[in-house]
Amino acid sequence: MKNSLTILVVASALASTAHAQSSVTAYGKVDLGLVLDSGNAAGKSLRLSSGIGGGSRLGFRGEEDLVGANKAAFQLETGFCADSAAASAFCTGSNNFMGRQAHLDLTTAYGKLVAGRQYSLGYLTATTLDPFSNGYAGQVENTDGKGSYLVDTSGTRLNNSVAYTTPTFSGLNAAVEFALGEATGNWRANREVGATVGYANGPIYAALSYYGVDNSNGQGQSRRTTTGGATYDFGVVKLAGLVQKVGGEPTGGNRIDALNWMAGATVPVAGGRIMGSIVRHDDRTSLQKDATQWGIGYIYPLSKRTSLYTAYAHIANRNHAGFLVGNATDTGTGTRAFNLGASHNF
């Protein structure tokens, strides 16, 4: 009896220790609102849209302590449409199973190594600098190249990728990434690379990043993007600026040469925050498909997890440029868009 009791106590202690050293958490986001598009020759569009500020998602993340201060972790995240049982043209937030993120991590005193499907370093830089965080009608991504080139100039998420991030020294760190194209017989085809250097200290954040992807024959880069910028939080207003140089030679496509810039601000008002920006796309090719976007929005938190939001943006295209006002998961249908909705994180 005494031996059985001793074994039970030891087993319970070991189970408690194992539980303290590892954890798995389920989390998610439901974002749903109205989108009113105009400025399309076919007319206006009014719809209920999922993922305006950020894609609706369900995810799992876990972490386990290893020997010393080392840690192993994972993240699995899938998107879904909160307004429909099936993915639609207006809910494209990586709705394949675990299509948002799926990666395994290892953290040591020498840095962090992440392998799998993950956000690109260039996308993370642009998202951090953008007052709209690459969501809502005013996002900087509306004019960063998608409208005229039908490509994603910052990579967003990379498949088959490995990324390494250094430890942070006095607010400064760096990272590199590499994604295999996995084309048989040509390892350079569709290969993606990236790097970033960032600095965060008190009210200051600054970053410089590079993203490039080789074309399908592996004989050049179909696009390359260098993004740099900074934010400074004065308390009463947070200012943000971004400059982005885009180039490339797509296989069988037109040469890409453009300069984008963004100036924006975030202002705390009445318990929420106003966000606004002006974005300029300067096409340096002979086509000169230029565009200018301005956007404004407001987010009001009802609690730590639930917020109401509204946003509006307008794009002025030149020389038949095809930029549209979209949001985090919606490419948009017109040159003007109004958003009104709510999001809940769990």
Image (tube, rainbow, N blue to C red):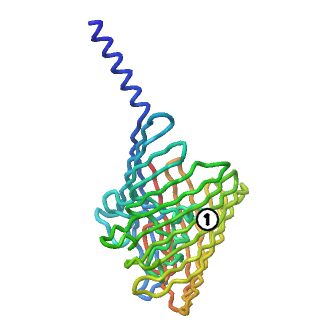
Residue found 46% across the figure and 40% down from its top? 71
Q: Position of residue 276 (x, y in %)?
A: 62, 68
Foreground: 260 or 31? 260
Q: Is residue 287 left or right of residue 252?
A: right
Foreground: 68 or 104? 68
Q: Position of residue 317 (x, y in %)?
A: 55, 86
Foreground: 56 or 284? 284
How many numbered circles are shown?
1
Q: Position of residue 77 (x, y in %)?
A: 38, 54
Residue found 71% across the figure and 54% down from its top? 235
Q: Position of residue 334 (x, y in %)?
A: 47, 81
Q: Look at the picture and state if 44 lies above or below 305.
A: below
Disc 1: which residue = 208
Q: Is residue 262 left or right of residue 123?
A: right
Q: Residue furthest top?
A: 2
Q: Look at the picture and state if 143 lies above or below 235.
A: below
Image quarter of residue 188: bottom left
At label 1, the amino acid type is: Leu
Classify the position of the N terminus by image quarter: top left
Residue found 66% across the figure and 58% down from its top? 205
Q: Residue furthest front?
A: 185
Tag 1, which secondary structure?
strand
Q: Residues within 10 Å of mark 1 (few under 14, many from 20)?
A: many
Residue found 38% across the figure and 21% down from its top? 13
